[in-house]
Amino acid sequence: MKQATDEERQAVWKTLLLRSTRGVLSPGDIVQTAAHFHLSRFVVARIWERGISSMGDRVAAVVKSRKSARGRKKLDRAVLCEHVSAVPVNERENHRKIQQASNTSSYLIQQLIKEGYMRRALRQTRSLLTASHRVARLKLAVNHVKLNGDGQYYFDPMFDVVHIDEKWLYVKKIAQRVYVLTGKDGTPLEEAPVQYVQSKRHIKKVMFLCAVARPRGDWDGKIGLWPVVETYITQRWGVNRPAGRCVTVAKNACRAQIPDLNCLDLGYFCSIQSLQSHTSPQTTEDLIKEVEIAFAETTAETLNKTFLTLQLVMKEIMTNEGRNHYRLTHMHKDKLINAGQLPTTLMRDAEILFSARSAIAMLSVEQIYAEQLRAAQPLPGTSLNL
């Protein structure tokens, strides 16, 4: 027989009160009530007796379950959080380390995560920025802020800006998630496929150079996508290809730069790569063809959203004094597009602009002081006589 909840107990008590006459039940009332609520007649009888006894003290009837006041008391979550906070964040890599350092059980650690007191986070590695880097980032963001006729500050919609960037794309993925069939008892009916390469560093890849602008009117903003490769005819016979075959070889362009101020690295390359990942290219030529098809299928709406993301990044750069550690706010762009309310540019507070300008002045002074201090240091092998 199931256990009665507090709401069911209160409903049983009200039903028995309606059936009673001056606190006395008729024969069969308890059995009929128990059958109606799918409870044992002994449970219904105890609810009636407890309600009558509490009414005898001239107070409201109390028929709630007493099991909540029994058993081991729940540990205070604030005390547990204090124990965990005493452990440095860099040392909280897994449950076992937290358990040993905070002197708590693995069950309590799991309960803190389940109840929302603790969550799993990814420790990221960011580019190290000097004062000159931060000043350049702040100046770039501040220069894109304009003043309209109403005295409000807004970001430049960037209709006269072209973004150019490069991206490495691979023929094969190092690891890929697939779904295999299993029996009801968990016996595998299929095996996950395994790909064999001599080295992960030798997987074929191609660098693509892409140029885009802000979409407008009937133009999708796509200027072009070009593979950085060299095609030539082999002169000698080899083990992997005969002489006279046309071979395409990927060429290296330039090293990666800071990606958070280029709309191509803020989601557009990910959209192209997501469409290209549905294919299975085997050669460099196949990869180039599939990437060009994915570039053509990527919509102008996706490109337009990346320009708004770039404006959000500039806003965070001005708020955090040029640093690259921040968290972007969710704009819900798809909802705004469906409602026809997606803005072309974002409005900015004057306080953020003024604080960014003051940060530029402060960082410039620090940069000049650091250069003077570096110039005053003696060269190696020399001594400074005071």
Image (cartoon, rainbow, N blue to C red):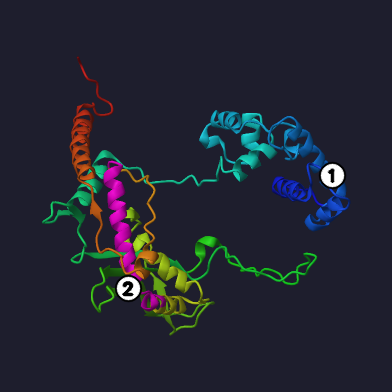
Q: Quadrant of the C terminus?
A: top left
Which residue type does callout 2 highlight? Ala
Which stretch did the figure color magenta? 294-321
Furthest residue in direction right, as rendered: 27
Q: Residue at x 24, y 29 (%)?
A: 379
Residue 292 image position (x, y, % from top left)? 38, 77
Residue 17: tell me if it is visible.
yes
Residue at mark 2: 300
Furthest residue in direction left, as rendered: 149
Residue 268 image position (x, y, % from top left)? 37, 66
Tag 1, which secondary structure? helix
314 lies left or right of 107: left
Residue at mark 1: 45
Q: Residue at x 78, y 55 (%)?
A: 37
Residue 169 image position (x, y, % from top left)? 43, 67
Magenta stretch holds residue 315: yes
The tag earlier along the polypeptide, 1 or 2, is: 1
Residue 206: tell me if it is visible.
no
Above or below for 228 versus 10: below
Above or below for 213 versus 93: below
